């Protein structure tokens, strides 16, 4: 990224980190973080997403992690409802205004605690 920004702007990345890095809440070491989960619209409702999350929870449990976490956009109502049905709860919300060509918006950090 430093090379792509050019010398006049590179210091901003070094000084403050990337925009994506600043927009995302830190991930604790005892949490398995799901970077991305997506199921094709034609395949939704077939249990694919539920199965993928079950595998993530199984992996977290096997490695004795505290929880599984993920971020979901405010505007993604379907995903929010899905994660709530799967036992995730809201931990925090991050809002951002338009900057560097990235539209205003935000995300919700959700977490599913591992029992035991």
Image: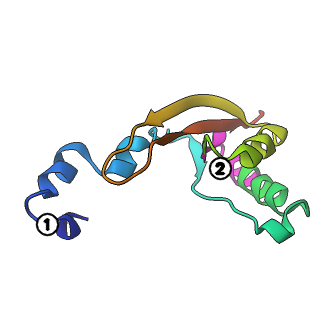
Q: Is residue 69 above or below residue 20?
A: above
Q: Nearer the viewer, residue 78 or 103?
A: 103
Q: Nearer the viewer, residue 111 or 72?
A: 72
Q: Is residue 63 above or below residue 48?
A: above
**Residue 66 shows in the view:** no
**Residue 96 shows in the view:** yes
Would you say 99 lies left or right of 27 here?
A: left
Q: How is the image coloured?
A: rainbow
Sooner in the amino-acid sequence: mark 1 or mark 2:
1
Give the x, y percent position of residue 68: 66, 44
The Cα–Cα distance between marks 1 and 2, rounded to whole angstroms, is 42 Å
| Residue in the image at 61% along x and 40% along y | 74
Give the x, y percent position of residue 94: 49, 34
**What segment is highlighted magenta in the picture?**
58-72
Residue at which label 2 appears? 63
Residue at which label 1 appears? 6
Mark closer to the observer (1, 2): 1
| Residue in the image at 14% along x and 56% along y | 9
């Amino acid at each position: 990224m430093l090379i792509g920004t050019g010398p006049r702007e590179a210091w901003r990345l070094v000084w403050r980190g990337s925009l994506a890095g600043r927009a995302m809440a830190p991930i604790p070491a005892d949490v398995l973080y799901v970077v991305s989960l997506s199921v094709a619209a034609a395949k939704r409702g077939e249990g694919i997403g539920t199965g993928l999350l079950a595998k993530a929870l199984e992996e977290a449990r096997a490695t004795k992690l505290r929880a599984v976490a993920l971020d979901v956009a405010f505007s993604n109502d379907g995903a929010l409802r899905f994660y709530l049905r799967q036992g995730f709860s809201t931990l925090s919300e991050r809002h951002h205004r338009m900057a560097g060509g990235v539209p205003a918006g935000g995300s919700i950090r959700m977490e599913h605690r591992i029992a035991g």
